[in-house]
Image: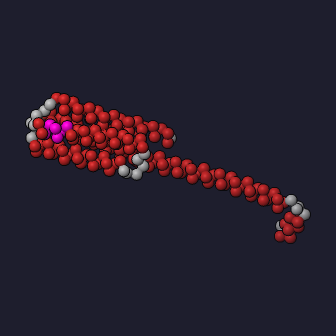
Amino acid sequence: MSWEVVSCWIEHHPGLASWVQAVGSIAAILAAIWIASRDSRLRRRAEIEVKSHSIVRAKTVVGDAGRRVYSAIETVKKFIVTPDLMGSISADLNQTQQHLKEAMSSPGVDSEIYTLIFLARTAVEEVAQVMQMIEKKMDLEKRLVEQAEIALNQITAAYESLKIMSSLLRVSSS
């Protein structure tokens, strides 16, 4: 088939250009829809991945805070309270507070995650204050230890909430 035959056929079908234009327009619209849909899916996956990583970081830091607070409480219960012991506990709790503060400002932390980390941080601050009271009195008051244990329960609740968020995020991303 030569170009002359094709050219002759096109010249004898004047509506052909309109049909080609219509088909091209429809193809362009479908391509635009597909590209927008793909970009939306990719963006959503990226957001889920960032949130997932932030939950993992938050769980790690809040879990560590819980272990450190638990250790501080048990240490004060089991050993004689000395300034050196309390200094060590205080330094450990200060380090924990710093880790929680850093986790609050890490990428992907939304308001829900921020709130849970903040609750854990305030609980650690409360335990640090209780430990200072114990150190100043140099004796163990049951009421102060109970106050620290309540703060530990708040940290545990924040950790459990983060675990639930992580599970829900995995289910919704599937």
User: How far across and down, in percent of the image, does residue 3 sit?
Assistant: 83, 70
Please tell me which residue is depicted at 14% across the width and 42% down the height of the picture.
Answer: 86
* Spot occupied by residue 18 in the image (x, y as percentages of width and height): 82, 59
Seen in the picture, residue 17 relative to 37 is either above or below; the reply is below
Q: Nearer the viewer, residue 79 or 37?
A: 79
Above or below, 94 against 7 in this view is above
Apparent side of residue 17 relative to residue 94 in the rendered image (left or right): right
Q: Which image quadrant: the N terminus?
A: bottom right
- At a point 34% along the width and 37% down the height, the residue shown is 158
Q: Position of residue 145 (x, y in %)?
A: 19, 32
Asked whether residue 67 appears in the rendered view, the answer is no
- Picture colour scheme: secondary structure
- Total marks shown come to 0
Residue at 65% in and 54% down: 32
Q: Could you say which quadrant of the image residue 56 lies in?
A: top left
Range shown magenta: 130-135
Write down the quadrant of residue 59 in the picture. top left
Instruction: Name the residue rendered at 74%, 58% in the picture.
Output: 24
Specify whether residue 133 is painted magenta: yes
Q: Main secondary structure of the magenta part?
A: helix
Residue 142 in view: yes
The image shows residue 115 at horizontal and vertical percentages of 38, 41
Asked whether 136 falls inside the magenta stretch, the response is no
